[in-house]
Each structure stands twice: as C-alpha cells, then as structure tokens.
Amino acid sequence: MPQPQSILLPLLLSTACVQAAPVQFHDLVGVWNMSAAYRLHPDGTQADDYGPAPRGLLIVTPDGRYCVQIYHTERPPFTSKDYRNATPAEYQRAMLTASTHFGTLKLDQERHLLVFHITGALNAGWDGSVQERPFELKGDTLSWRVPPRPDGDTPVSVWKRSP
C-alpha cells in the first residue's frame, strides 16, 4: 500500500499547476450593481470617489453592447424643478458627481483588458474614444482600474453581479 506522503505530493503538485480558466466574454454578460468606487492614491491608501455608498449600474449584452452609470452617494437636487434653470455651480456639481457612458465592449484576453468603444458619454470628450481597463473577475465580483488621473490617483470601480 502506498504511503500517504507518496500520494499527497503528486496531488499537491498537480493542483498547484492548475490555472484558473481565462475569462470569456459571456462571463461579463448581465446586469451588475456598483458595490464600490474609490481612488487608489500613489502611496497605496484609498479614498471614496463617489461617496461611501455610490450608486451605479453596468449592463453588458451578449452582442457586446454596454451601458455604465455611476452616481455619487449624495447628489442634492437642483434648486429649480426645471434643471435647465440650474445655476452654474449646480451644473458643475452634477457633472462631477456622475460618470456615464455607453457603446460596445470587447475583451482582450491576451492583455487582460476590457476595451470600451465609447459611443456617448456624460464627458463629451470621451465620445468616440476607445478606453482600456485592466480588470479582475472573481466569482460575481468584477472590478476595473481607470488610468491614473493627473494627481496620480487611480480610480477603481467594483461591481457585483445582480441576482
């Protein structure tokens, strides 16, 4: 009868060599709710980016279309019931407390990137752009990093698959 050690070692070695299956596009398809949005500072610390409990929705369709909406936790309403009569400060606050865009999404498996082909965005400078995001998918949690901002902070978005 073989000794337990002689069975255990090959089993451990074979398990250590098994790699997780690569992410497939169909793994991204569905509805995702934002669970966190933060800025990672160059020193490794982090801070909220859209408040302590940001609201957001990511929808990815099987044919590769997507829509992202992210909103700050505390978005006070405009003082006027008609947003077209808002003050310049209210417009600025609205612009800086939301991030939305839509278009088509591709998965670059070799470089482990999400590639957003942006059709339209709240930030008009993004319209027609292509943006790449390194990402992680662990179970029902998807996260990606945005390229660092001029201040060195790296925004991170974290999503949970909707049941």
Image (spheres, rainbow, N blue to C red):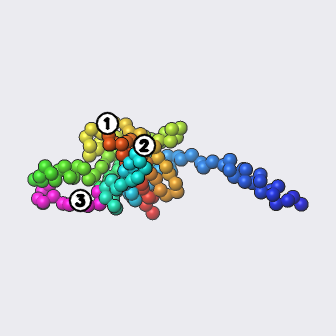
The residue nearer to you, when weighing 134 against 60, is: 134
Q: Give the amino acid at mark 1.
A: Gly
Where does the N terminus fall, quadrant-wise?
A: bottom right
Image location of residue 96, percent across then percent down: 25, 50
Residue drawn at point x = 47 percent, y = 50 percent:
28
- Which residue was labeled with disc 1? 128
Residue bounds of the magenta highlight: 72-83
Q: Is residue 118 visible?
A: yes
Rounded to the nearest whole Å, what is the CA distance between mark 1 and mark 2?
16 Å
For label 3, count other residues whose C-alpha is less than 10 Å away and answer few (under 14), some (14-19) or many (20+): few
Q: Is residue 59 visible?
A: no
Q: Main secondary structure of the magenta part?
A: loop
102 in magenta: no
Residue drawn at point x = 82 percent, y = 60 percent:
4
Question: What number of labels is visible?
Answer: 3
For label 1, count other residues whose C-alpha is less than 10 Å away and answer few (under 14), some (14-19) or many (20+): some
Image location of residue 137, percent across then percent down: 50, 51
Q: Residue furthest right?
A: 1
The numbered mark at residue 133 is 2
